[in-house]
Amino acid sequence: MNTETAPATGPTADPAAVGQVMGQLMADLAATSGMLLTVIGVRTGLWDSLAAEPATPSELAARASAAEPYVREWLRSQAAAGYVRYEPATGRYSLPAAVAALMTGEPLRGLVEGAGLQAAAQWAEVARYEEAFRTGRGIGWDEHGPAHSHGMDLISRAVVVPALAGWLAALDGVAPTLEAGGTVADVGCGYGSPTIAMARAFPRSRFLGIDADDASVARARKAAAAAGLGTRVTFEVADAAGLPSEGGEGFDLVTFVDCLHDLGDPVAALRGARKALAPGGSVLLVEHAGSQHTEENLNPAGRFFYAASALVCTPNALAHGGAGLGTIPGEQALRAVAAESGFSQVSRVGVDAPLNILLQLRPLPSGARRWTMGRWIRPGGSSAGTRCLRCCAPRSTRRPPGGASCC
Ligand SMILES: C[S@@+](CC[C@H](N)C(=O)[O-])C[C@H]1O[C@@H](n2cnc3c(N)ncnc32)[C@H](O)[C@@H]1O
């Protein structure tokens, strides 16, 4: 009997299917190094120079004051990516208008550069990630270094800042208060660009930005000083759960811009925000859009945000003592966290923001009444309250006709 065994082999698979996976891996490799070239194109002005008119490599090199051999290979790679058109008859490359809009136009090119800077910082930390995956150790936002935070700020200035005034205008009852002169706290403010944008939109209001990262707060203070906003805008190093109330009077608005899902204890942070609100005040959550069901996010945006979650947001939450909500929490999970934190009213803000979901949270106002057992009652049992639980409107003690609530 032959006792020799066949040499061990890996699992067998259909060669055509393996070829397909190889193709996907090649696309990933191409995108990884291609993204670096794209960012280099932003920083060296190659995109701007090519947008001016079609060029051969030597013409573009001269126009952008760059070295021709680098420019030649850069153009070839971008043509293979489909960002640049190549005309073999003339040897010239050209930039389609839609590509130019993204690579050369402010503020969107900040998104390209910012995401690229963050990716570069994350690649440089591969050993730290390996250790964290094994041990479960957290990695705070402050540990990624200034290039990573700068990248975040570029993204924020490209995506959030241009939209923010419109978002605040879409909130129920907030803009009139801020126009008259209200108070706002921006939790997890980063470099403060959203805080400063809000301060510019509402020149009679006062703003406090807080962040756990002292380097980010230092940058935010410098930016506010450069913007000439005086004492109307201040920044403090503080944990999200430790929001002070504004001079004891409370804030008219507390914002969490792309921040709640980063926190180790989102419920504690929202409870702190609730306590720091002025009567009638509300909280704005700006979070990434997406479903709470994993199977509904299996697309390129889902892939990107789940990766960001594994590399930045979840590690930060772990560094702050929790597992976090994940970068795509989904509306249902956000509503559950809001309810657990004592917000009885949660409304979806109707804005055109394909990558974001916005929720406005309001607590049960003191004196609000609930329709229970055939009459309006105030929390604590008194029936002498004057406001509706859901819409905060003054109500009569009679139930409104034809509906379960007045709003
Ligand atoms: C995705 S960045 C958003 C920054 C800013 N809101 C923006 O849109 O530009 C998240 C921010 O939350 C801050 N952060 C994370 N954990 C925090 C905590 N426990 N308390 C306060 N800030 C925190 C980070 O330092 C980082 O600046």
Image: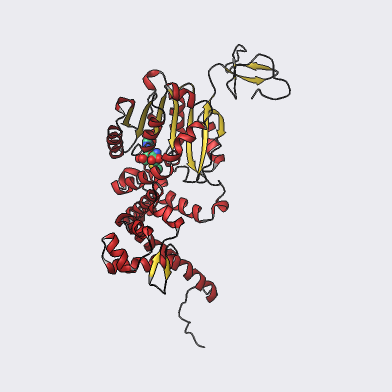
Q: Quarter holding the C terminus?
A: top right
Q: Position of residue 57 (x, y in %)?
A: 32, 68
Q: Residue at x 59, y 19 (%)?
A: 393
Residue 102 left/right relative to 144? right
Q: Is residue 321 visible?
A: no
x and y percentages locating residue 370 in the rendered image? 62, 20
Residue 338 against residue 262 in the figure, above or below = above
Q: Residue at x 39, y 66 (%)?
A: 93
Which sits in the foreground, 42 or 101? 101
Q: Residue furthest bottom?
A: 1
Question: Is residue 103 rendered to the left or right of residue 375?
Answer: left
Q: 357 or 92: which is nearer to us? A: 92
Q: Ligand 1 lies in which image quarter?
A: top left
Find the residue positioned furthest to the right.
402
Q: Position of residue 142 (x, y in %)?
A: 31, 43
State the residue in front, 262 or 116.
116
At 52% across and 35% down in the image, what residue appears?
359
Report whether residue 122 is seen: yes
Where in the figure is residue 350, as x and y percent of width and height? 56, 37
Number of numbered discs visible in the structure rendering: 0
Q: Quadrant of residue 179?
A: top left
Task: Relative to 318, say whether 381 is above or below.
Answer: above
Colour mode? secondary structure
